[in-house]
Image (cartoon, rainbow, N blue to C red):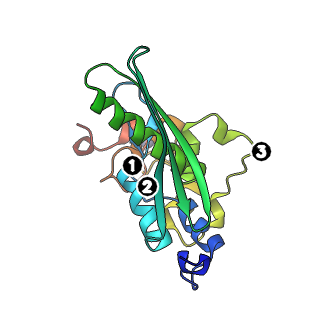
Amino acid sequence: MKKNDTIPEEKQYTEIMEEIKSSFPKGTVQRRSDNNRRYIPIQVYEHRMETATNSQWSKEVIELEINSEMKFVKCIIRVYVGGYFRDGIGLSPITQSVSNSVDLASTEALRNAFDSFEMGWKDLHQFTDWGKNPGINISINKLSNNTDSFESNKIRKCKKCKKKLSEEDIEMVDDIPKLNIDYCIEHIPDQFIR
Ligand SMILES: [Zn+2]
């Protein structure tokens, strides 16, 4: 395959990267029940990769180590976009079946590879310490055509009491996909709270 064939001519790498890095719709970020950590499901990442690159991306397992003595699985996956690639590493302890641990390690590796393309950063940075680092300089307003990122860029207030939403309020509101109006935790209508 010639290098020119890997990315359709009308879509340049910079354009693809812009699309890869752009914000996801509200409700995309999930919260793990066991440790409260935020994450974006792997299917969402893969779908973004498909659409942003017109299916011109691929992945390759670079390393898969099943260490039965130390009881862990290590996986390194490489994701290619055109002539560029990023590696992601995944580790999983072997608790039950080996195949289950291989699945978990490879999913983590793939997610980390996608993460290296800065995919999902605009959505996840608010939940992280690194996201507040000025060296990262995540500019949400660069994507002015995206309503969600526009929303998150302005001051959000409770519709009822007009109070500025705290970080906790925002997390709560953003965790309820059906809720499209901002409320503080106190004033979220009952039907949205399970
Ligand atoms: Zn309120």
Q: Name the residue furthest top.
A: 69
- Whether residue 122 is situated above or below residue 102 in the rendered picture: below
In this rendering, position of residue 38 left or right of residue 130:
left
Mark 1 neighbour class, 10 Å CA radius: few under 14, some 14 to 19, many 20 or more:
some
Between 151 and 161, which is closer to the camera in this rendering?
151
Q: Amino acid at mark 3?
A: Gly
Q: Are marks 3 and 1 in contact (CB under 8 Å)?
A: no
Task: Give the Cα separation between the discs numbered 3 and 2.
Answer: 25 Å
Q: Is residue 192 visible?
A: yes
Mark 3 residue crowding within 10 angstroms, few (<14) / some (14–19) / many (20+): few
The residue lying toward the viewer, choosing from 156 and 98, is 98
Mark 3 or 1: in front is: 1
Q: What's the CA distance linking mark 3 and mark 1?
A: 27 Å
- At a point 33% along the width and 37% down the height, the residue shown is 103
188 w.r.t. 97: above or below? below
Q: Amino acid at mark 1?
A: Ile
Residue 54 placement (x, y as % from top left) = 45, 74
Residue type at mark 2 is: Tyr
Q: Nearer the viewer, mark 3 or mark 2?
A: 2
Say which residue appears at 26% left-offset and 44% top-offset.
192
Residue at x 55% of width, y 73% of height: 145
At which x and y percent is residue 68?
A: 38, 18
How many C-alpha atoms fall within 10 Å of the one at disc 2: few (<14), some, or many (≥20)? some
- The answer to whether residue 154 of the structure is visible from this angle is no
Q: Residue furthest right?
A: 135
The disc placed on residue 135 is 3
Which label sits on residue 45? 2
